Amino acid sequence: MDFTLSKEHEMARTLFRDFAQKEVKPFAQEVDETEQFPTETTEKMKKLGFMGIPIPKEYGGQGCDTLTYAMCIEELSKVCGTTGVIVSAHTSLCAEPLKKFGTPEQKEKFLVPIANGTKLGAFGLTEPGAGTDASGQQTKAVLDGDEYIINGSKIFITNGKEADVYIVFAMTDKSKGTKGISAFIIEKGTPGFTFGTKEKKMGIRGSSTYELIFTDCRIPKSNLLGQEGKGFGIAMQTLDGGRIGIAAQALGLAAGALETTIAYVKERKQFGRSIAKFQNTQFELADMATKVEAARLLVYKAAVAKDTQKIFSVEAAMAKLFAAEVAMEVTTKAVQLHGGYGYTREYDVERMMRDAKITEIYEGTSEVQKMVISANIL
Amino acid sequence: MKIVVCIKQVPDTNEVKLDPVTGTLIRDGVPSIINPDDKAGLEAALEIKEATGAEVTVITMGPPQADAVLREAMAMGADNAYLITDRAFGGADTLATSTTLAAAIKTMEYDMIITGRQAIDGDTAQVGPQISEHLDIPNVSYAEDIKVEGNTVIVKRQFEDRHHVVKVQMPCLITALGEMNKPRYMTPGGIFDAYRSKEVKIITRADLTVADEEIGLKGSPTKVAQSFPKSVKPAGTKVVLDAKDSADYIIEKLQEKFII
C-alpha cells in the first residue's frame, strides 16, 4: 500500500490550487453575498477542461481519473463551495451517466459538448414528495409515437437554470414501482420545459438551484437514457459517483476552513500573545487536522475504488458520511476559534460553515449513507 | 516553423524566506517554478503555435529534477522537451551555460529561439544574448510583443523611455519580458499526457560537440565577488491631483531630493 500521490496527481493539484486561489477565491464572498452564479469563473473552467476531467478524450474529456477529479473539487471547495458543486453536479450527475449508459449517438450528441465544456449539465431526480424516498416519483413520461411526453416537476436542481442538458427521471409505468422509472435526456429550450422557483439557500448561495417544470414536454424517443424501466438503477449508480464529488466538496470546505484558521490564530493576539500559543487552540487544531486527513483518505480511497471496482457504493457512502460530518464539525470549530469575527461575513469561515451543512443533506443524507453502509455489513 | 524555448527551473522567490539569524535565503522546502520571464516566452511561442501551427520545443539545463518544469511546459502545450543534464555541466556560469545550451540547440532544427530576459535567481540577463552570439544569429532583447510575418519577426522591444519596433529575419533569438502576457494554465489532460504519453529526452555531455574547457566549472571565468538580496522598493506615495498640480507636486519633490 502506497499513499504517495503520483507526479501527475501532484502537478494536477498544483494546477487546481493555483486556479482556485487566483480565479475563484477573489470572488467567493461576492458570489455568496449576491447569490449570483459565477458565470465568468465557470467559463474559465470550461476552457481549461475542468468540466470533463474523468471523461475519456474520445468523448471530449481530459482522460484523467476520478482521483484527479476529486482533487479538483477539493481545491475549488477550499475557497468556494459554490464553485465546487457546479463542477461536481455537472460531471458526476450528467457527464458520468451519459458515459456509462449513453448510446454511441447519445454520447456524440450530448456527452462530447458536456465534457468539452461547450454545455453545462444537471440532474433532476428529487421531487416535492420524492426526496430520500426517490421511488415516489410523480413525474410521468408517456410514449406517443416517436416521442415521450413528460409531465411533472423536479425541485432543488443544482445548475438549474444555467444548464443546457438535464438527466431527468420519470415514471413510465407507475404499476411497476421503482422498475417503472426511466431516465431521459432533456435539453434546455424544449417546448414545455420551464423553470419555477429559485431556492433561497443557507449556503452554496451562488449555485443556481431551481425547480424544473415539465408541461406536455415532448422529447424524442431517442433521448431515453438506458432502457425503459431501468431509471432507478441509473439514478442510484449515478449517485454513488456523485457522492464522491460531494465528499470531495465537504473535504475541501473542511480543509479550507482549517487552512484559514491556522493563518488566523497566528495573527490574532489576546492576553499579549497570539492565540496559537494557547493549548486549547493547539488541541482543537490537532483534532481538526486529523479529521481532515482521515476524510481525505476516505475520499481518495473511494475515488480510486470507482476506477478499479465494479461496485463502490460503500466506499462512496463512507467517504460522504464522514467527510460531510467533518466539514460541519471543522467549519463550526473554525468559527469558534475566530470568535466574534468568525460570526461576521467579513471572514470566510462564516460562509464555509453555512456551505458545509448541505453536504450532510444532498445526494443522499447522512442517514441514507448509514443505510447503504449498514445494509452491506448486516 | 520550429520554435525552441529555453526555460529554467528556479526557486519561487515569493516563497523564499530570510533566515532571521544569518540573513541568508532559506531555500529548503521552497517550491520550484518555471522562471517567470521564460514562462512568458513559452506562452508567446504557444500563441504562435496556435496561429501558425509551429512546433514548440522546450529545453532546460539542470539537474534531473528539472524534469518537472519540462513536463509543466508540455502540460501547457509544448510539443517536445529536452533535459540537458550531466555532472560535466555543473558549476557553470552564464558563459558556460550559454555555450552548452547553444551546443544542444545546434543539434535541433529551429527558426526562432525564445529565452526569458533574466532568471529571478541570478538576474544576469546574459544567457539569451550569449546563445545568439554562439549561434551567430540576430538577437532582439526585452520583447514585449512578438509577431511572425513570413520569414521575419516583428518585435516590440522595451527601451528606457520608449519602445523600439524591430523587424528581424529568422532564424533569430528573442528574449521575453514577463510582462508580455499572462501565461496560460496547464490542463488536467495535458498534465496526464505530459507524464504518461510524452517523453522528456535527455541530452548529456556525450551528445554535444563542445570542448571540455568550455563547459561546467572549467568553462566559467566568472568569479562572484559578492552577492546580495534584491532591495525591496517601498510602496511609494500615491496622490491624485489635476495636471497642473501634479506637475507642481513632482517638481517640488524632485527639488526636495536635490535631483533638479
Image (cartoon, coloured by chain):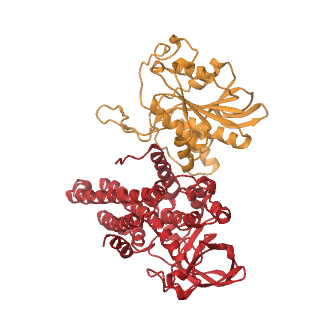
Chain colours: A red, B orange
Furthest toward the left, the residue is A279
Q: Quadrant of the C terminus of chain A?
A: bottom left
Residue A169 placement, left or right of A74: right
Where residue B91 sits, quadrant-wise, is top left
Residue B214 in the image: x percent, y percent? Answer: 53, 13
Residue A144 in the image: x percent, y percent? Answer: 70, 84
Residue A64 in the image: x percent, y percent? Answer: 53, 52
Label count reads 0
Residue A272 placement, left or right of B188: left
Residue A152 in the image: x percent, y percent? Answer: 59, 85
Comparing A138 with A76, the one in front is A138
- Compared with A348, B233 (above or below) is above
Comparing B34 with A47, the one in front is A47
Say which residue appears at 39% left-offset and 57% top-offset.
A301
Say which residue appears at 50% left-offset and 68% top-offset.
A238
Residue B5 placement, left or right of B233: right
Say which residue appears at 53% left-offset and 55% top-offset.
A23
Where residue B26 sits, quadrant-wise, is top left
Look at the image and tell me whether residue B159 can be seen: no
Residue A329 placement, left or right of B222: left
Furthest toward the right, the residue is B150
- Compared with A22, A254 (above or below) is below
Say which residue appears at 49% left-offset and 49% top-offset.
A12
Look at the image and tell me whether residue A277 can be seen: yes
